[in-house]
Image (cartoon, helix red, strand yellow):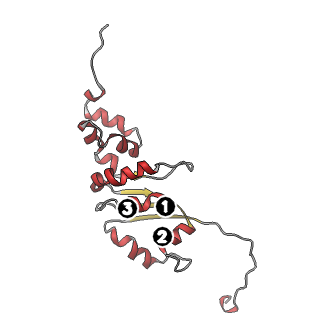
Amino acid sequence: MSRSNVNLLDLPDAILLIILKKLNNIDVLYSLIDVNNEHLNSLAQEKIFSDTLNFVSIDNVSAIDQEKLDRFCKDILPKIHENIKCFILEPISMECILLAADYRNLTELKLINFTQEVALNYFTKNRGRFIHNSHLQNKILLYMSRLHSFTFYISTYDDTDDLFRYVPSQDIQ
């Protein structure tokens, strides 16, 4: 029985894309962009791998370490920024990722795993305890002109040790 010299890269692009679609988009981009193979590099830059990028950790395990995040922000995102339509981000990676390129086609931004403290820091800069709509509009959404969906999850914790607080009579009406 003779062995053939068929290589994985000899497969048609359609089959390679089917295989790559079974993998996480972040892993495909990180593993194949700027490798020493132009064919894999161009396949990884297909829109199907970069239209939605999820940088959120799963089960408190970081989805992306600092070295990987740095490479994404410096090398990968500037190459694929035109393809990106949706980001799913956590506070730890948000700033680096959003500043890495001009995302003209970004239409959806999901911010996940924000604590109340982090949200207040990002969106109010200690001006108060509430995220004000105009601040959100002027500081964030203004720079994302094509954004049509903004999902924002804030997890909060209310310390109930002081259940009986003084409430002024004018507030009780």
Q: 4 or 21, which lies in front?
A: 4
Residue 14: image location, x then y, percent: 27, 35
Left or right of 160: which side holds 28?
left
Q: Amino acid at mark 1?
A: Pro
Tell me, yes or no, whether the two marked residues, 2 and 1, touch with CB atoms within 8 Å: yes
Q: Amino acid at mark 3?
A: Leu
Q: Residue furthest top?
A: 1
In which quadrant is the N terminus drawn? top left
As helix, strand or loop, the secondary structure at mark 2 comes to helix
Q: Which residue is mark 2?
A: 122
Residue 66: image location, x then y, percent: 45, 51
* Image quadrant where residue 98 sits: bottom left
Residue 45: image location, x then y, percent: 28, 45
In which quadrant is the C terminus drawn? bottom right
Residue occupying the point 36% across, 34% down: 19
Q: Which mark is residue 91?
A: 1
Left or right of 45: which side holds 108?
right
* Image quadrant where residue 108 sits: bottom left
Q: Amino acid at mark 2?
A: Tyr
Residue 162: image location, x then y, percent: 74, 75
| Tally of numbered tags | 3
Q: Which residue is mark 3?
A: 98
Q: Residue furthest bottom?
A: 170
